[in-house]
C-alpha cells in the first residue's frame, strides 16, 4: 500500500503507546504503528 499525506494527517496525537519488543524502553504511537502495518515498514522500528 502506498501511504500519502492525507492518510498520515489523521494522526495528530495518540490514544495508545505500544511497546516495541525486545526493547523495553522503546514505545511508539498509533501513527508509527499505522506506517509500520500499512506501509509494511516494521523494519523502521528496528532501525
Image (cartoon, rainbow, N blue to C red):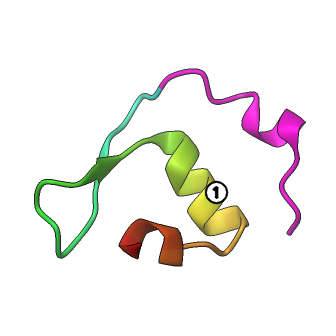
Counting from the top left corner in percent of width and height, residue 46 is at 38, 74
The answer to whether residue 15 is magenta is no
Residue extending furthest toward the left: 24
Q: Residue at x 83, y 55 (%)?
A: 3
Describe the element under mark 1 as helix, strand or loop. Answer: helix
Quarter holding the N terminus is bottom right
Q: Residue at x 87, y 34 (%)?
A: 6
| Callout 1 crowding tier (Cα within 10 Å): few <14, some 14–19, many ≥20 | some
Counting from the top left corner in percent of width and height, residue 14 is at 45, 28
Q: Which residue is mark 1?
A: 35
Q: Residue at x 88, y 63 (%)?
A: 2
Q: For this view, does 44 lie left or right of residue 18?
A: right
Residues rendered magenta in the picture: 1-13
The correct choice, above or below, for 30 with respect to 37 in the image is above
Quarter holding the C terminus is bottom left
Q: For this view, does 25 lie left or right of residue 20?
A: left
User: What is the magenta segment's predominant secondary structure?
Assistant: loop
Counting from the top left corner in percent of width and height, residue 41 is at 61, 72
Counting from the top left corner in percent of width and height, residue 31 is at 57, 42
Amino acid at each position: 500500500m502506498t501511504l500519502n499525506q492525507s492518510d498520515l494527517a489523521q494522526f495528530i496525537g495518540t490514544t495508545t503507546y505500544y511497546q516495541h519488543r525486545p526493547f523495553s524502553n522503546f514505545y511508539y504511537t498509533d501513527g508509527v504503528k499505522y506506517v509500520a502495518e500499512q506501509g509494511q515498514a516494521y523494519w523502521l522500528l528496528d532501525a
